[in-house]
Image (cartoon, coloured by chain):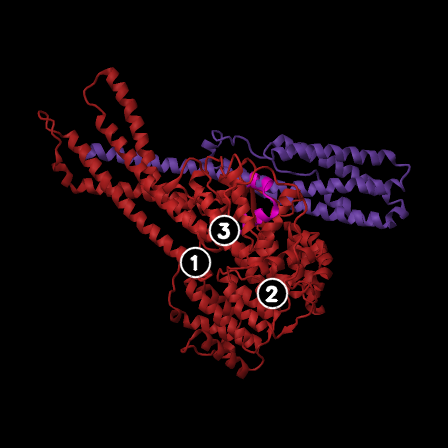
Amino acid sequence: MTPILIPVIVLVLIVALAAMVTGIFNKLVTYRNRYKNAFAQIEVQLKRRYDLIPNLVETAKGYMKHERETLEAVISARNQAIGGLQKAAQDPGNAEAIRGLAGAEGMLTGAMGRLFALAESYPDLKANQNMMQLSEELTSTENKVAFARQAFNDGVTTYNTYRQTFPTVMFAGMFGHAQDAALLEFESERIQDAPKISF
Amino acid sequence: MATDFFEHQDIARRNTGRLVILFVFAVLAIMVSIYLLLAATMGYLSRDPETGAIDWSLAGDLQLVGIAVVGTLVVVGGGTLFKIAQLRGGGRVIADELGGRRLNPDSSVPAERQLLNVVEEMAIASGTPAPPVYLLDEEEGINAFAAGFTINDAVIGVTRGAVERLPRDELQGVIAHEFSHILNGDMCLNIRLIGLLNGILIIGILGYFMFRVSAFSSYRQRRSSRESSPLPLLALGAGLMVVGFLGTFFGNLIKAGVSRQREFLADASAVQFTRQPAGIAGALKRIGGFLNGSKVQSPNAPEASHMFFGQATSGLSGLFATHPPLAERIRQLEPSWNGQFAEGFPRTESAPAPHPSDAGVAGLAGAEAVNRGAAQSVTSAVDHIGQPNTAHLHYAAGLLDELPTAIVDASREPYGARALIYALLIDRQTEARKLQIAHLARAADPGVCKETLKLLPLIEQLDARVRLPLVDIALSALRALTDAQYHQFKQNIVELVEADHTIDLFEWSLQRILLHDLEAQRFNATPGRVRYRKLHRLQPHYELLLSTLAYTGHRDEAEAREAFEQAKRVVALPQARFRQGEECGLEAVDAALTVLEEAAPRVKRQVLKAAAACIAADRKVTIAEAELLRAISASLGCPMPPLLSM
């Protein structure tokens, strides 16, 4: 009886192993898709933010005639951030692209911060209806970005943790999951601060 | 339509039962074949050295029988359970496997927006939470699918070909077809089919593996010219392969047979839904006239072939086709069809077809109106469960048109959707209102509180009737919350509801619908086992439910008792006993619903009919009462379309 029993046991083990490996593969794909979907939400909100900024600058231009440099800095930082977003959106799993986006976003937030700080000394601008509305919308969009970013980072963390645990870690590289995905961290929490400058 | 939602559910369930029986037979046949294979192999190994005759005496060995039985069970059972466990994630998992990309509910890309609008309208019209929509970017063919275990974890997937090539009315026909699958209970059947077939398939794969390995070792052994030959193993492997593939063959036959039948049904229900046979027939004609047809390229498409709108795999016809021939489906919808398929790109109109909002949204007036004509509509609402019609669809389209954009925008992304739900829960009374807003400022995400206050005036101007449809839209976005975000959200809802220490009907209904859906989604609830097939076994539970309902609509006990008696007459429940006030309450209803959820669909229909009768007994129905009925219906897994004539 033993000659036939051994292959049966071996086969059962093979089946179990194959099942486990397929499971790992599928789970990796599912987690990756999940954080990629979460990134799409960030993309929508960031795009809205980038669409709002030129309008804001246009409105400010009428009042801040002597601050051309600051205004231009905002626009160029915004254009750079758009490029960063496009790269990151192509592959949200690419850590470098994500860091690039974070950097560009940091610059933009800094430039916006300076703009708002300067705006403090232009009471007419502060009272402008259009400006008030735009900055209100910007605030709300930035809150949405922060929220979507939280969801993305949660997804990335789940993926990375799963990727690094045993036995997944043995197969992850083989299945094209060799790299951790990067968290999207904006430098400091300035993105929260900037809009708090009240009009 | 003679059969209604509940009967379809019953039929789907019975079909699942039949499938399981067929499957058990298949497994038994496989066991016998494997046993014979083993016996032959063993017999060959201990054959008579001189004559070479196979020794069949070993065949009687019980150990051999045991190995065949246990081996088959382990492999087939393991394969099936594994696949089902993997699919427990529900529709999302299947959409991912097929290469779907989840569309943002607030996408503004015109083609995506149109698709999302069509899905939202259908969801509102049928009273289901809007399912997430996945776009299969890589697929040129015109196709779509619905997948999931329950209404709460259903997803809809559409190929790029369908989005680009179908005009709005045809796309609507396709989506209506997929909604019918969701409402007819086909999805769960479909998922189980995948699981069962996978178990049988594994035997074939095993055989193939064994064949390869032993073929390889026989090659090596021949080179070293040793005595013992691996021929028996080779033969055993080949035999297993044949058994496995035969099993899969018959499995696919069963799958295709079941699927073809359900497709006709879904086509018919879709027409009933949109009352435009031209839409769905047009889509079918376009598939026929398109080079890529409805083909789906994803390597995972074959195992999900029976979930699609059109034949997803090519080259199969006759008994193996999971879908009836196109021409036959078109003739069912359009008997006078001339046999011409449609060709070319139709995408000329870009604006969504405007819908006449003739079905009641016209007067969006606030106030908790009491309506006498509504009693009739409440009782007929139960008949519409799972069977929305054109009127509901027009209502939904009109509703989306007339809602303030700020509200619609908020409902489509998770950040705003939370604020929207909070705003719905905030009391109009100043006392509780202060407490609630203070709580939000303290416990909610920074910014959400402000967002809520911004939405609040808009929400308060809304007609109370649109509150629940709004929740249906928002649910789609809320499902995207991560665990941490959801936890905080749920906590806040509970606190907002309890802020004034009394729970009113609307608060209860909203909380019930919201959490029932989101929890099911999060914990991958599979459709509950049917535990109760007879109404009388549920007596204490429905008594509590009906008595509470009787109290909510009627001031004094005599009136409540009268309403209860009326409900008893409507569904013939002679033994039902009216419960006194102190036993009743929304907590009691919560508990009763948990039990009633496990009743057979037929039983649920009776309970819902009685509930509707109870509410309508005094010929006066408030909006809050109607919402309560919808919440109860949703808790039992029965989507109720919005009430129209209120």
Q: Secondary structure at mark 2?
A: loop
Of all residues shown, which one is farthest toward the bottom?
B558
The residue closer to the viewer here, B469 or A45, is B469
The quadrant in which the C terminus of chain B is found is bottom right
Going from the N terminus, do you reach mark 2 or mark 3 first? 3
The residue closer to the viewer here, A161 or A146, is A146
The chain letter under disc 3 is B
Instruction: Kindly report the distance in space between the C-alpha atoms of the residues bearing marks 2 and 3.
Output: 28 Å
Magenta segment range?
B159-179
Q: Are marks 2 and 1 on the same chain?
A: yes
Q: Verify CB contact (< 8 Å) between mark 3 and mark 1.
A: no
Residue B236 appears anywhere in the view: yes
> In the rendered image of this protein, does residue B197 appear above or below residue B454?
above
Instruction: Kindly report the distance in space between the C-alpha atoms of the residues bearing marks 2 and 1.
Output: 25 Å
Report whether B516 appears left or right of B48.
right
Q: Secondary structure at mark 1?
A: helix
**Hey, what amino acid is under mark 1?**
Gln
Q: Which chain is purple?
A: A
Going from the N terminus, do you reach mark 2 or mark 1 first? 1
Going from the N terminus, do you reach mark 3 or mark 1 first? 1
Dot label at residue B339:
none
**Hey, what amino acid is under mark 3?**
Leu
Q: Which residue is mark 3?
A: B333
Q: Which residue is mark 1?
A: B9
Q: Secondary structure at mark 3?
A: helix
Q: Which residue is mark 2?
A: B644
The chain letter under disc 2 is B
